[in-house]
Image: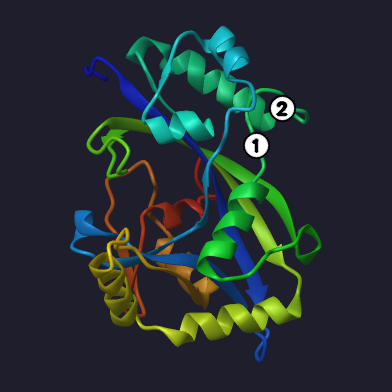
Amino acid sequence: MVTDSFFRVSAAALCRVIFPHPQTGVMQLALERRNSGPKDSGRVHAQPFGGALRLLDPAGFREAVGDFSYDSVRSSEEQDLRILIPPPAWNTVRSFILAQMQSGQPQVIETDPCRELEEEFSESVGITLLPEQYSYRPVGISVQDRPAPTTNRRLPGASTVRIYRIFEVVIRDHGIHEVLSEKSRRFTDEEMHALAEADSARGGTGRANGVLVLPMDEVRNACQGIHSSEEIHPLLIRGHFLDPTSFVLFEETHKWI
């Protein structure tokens, strides 16, 4: 039972980005690697590519679910579906978002991963990812009804419920397979942390972005038995911390909406 006067709703697309290893053909999982900043002592972690979905028609959304406010000025400017609502409105908001996600022609909410995926590839990999270089398909929806405090900088500590639409993204371009593998090897987590500190010293945001590539089955096996609705902590694989959102990518064996 939520007792806060409001809570935060976050709806996002998460991408299970996969490709065959250029030499062995073993399927690999690509994750966005970033310095997490001051909130976690600057620890570098890996997380799925993807991000907040956008409201294509904020007025239509308000008409369908009632009044809401954005969680920050930035969310308002970008029309991100990161909003604040009164607790009794959650069931209505939840049902409407799910209906849009499962609709073949959504009118109010963005429901595909392309915009966020291409933006993050540019930022983290340094590649302009073109539509013909990858394919994607939805593999499920995960709803986290139990509110938990967010570490998001926009409204840290706010009780947040989350809806994730999960996609499997297959990179089809062999040249990108090589780039992903090489960039994953280029920097250690310690070197990425040093890059973030250097950026901070220059007056920047103190963040660093890169990519991490791991064998997909190794990550899948490590995530077995873990459910994103539980209180979980980052998983350590081959010396790299994986953000809890990484576990959501492999929840097909759990309850999907």
Q: The residue under label 2 is which amino acid type?
A: Pro
Front one among 249 and 87:
87
Q: Which residue is mark 1?
A: 111
Q: Which residue is mark 2?
A: 106
Marks 2 & 1, CB-CB < 8 Å contact: yes
The quadrant of the rendering that contains the N terminus is top left
Image quadrant assignment for residue 176: bottom right
Image color mode = rainbow
Q: Which image quadrant for residue 239?
A: bottom left
Q: CA distance from mark 2 to mark 1?
A: 7 Å
Q: Secondary structure at mark 1?
A: loop
Farthest residue toward the bottom?
Answer: 23
- Name the kind of residue labelled 1 in the image: Thr
Residue 90 screen position, x and y as percent: 42, 17
Vertical arrangement, residue 216 with respect to residue 59, above or below: below
x then y, percent, for residue 19: 66, 73
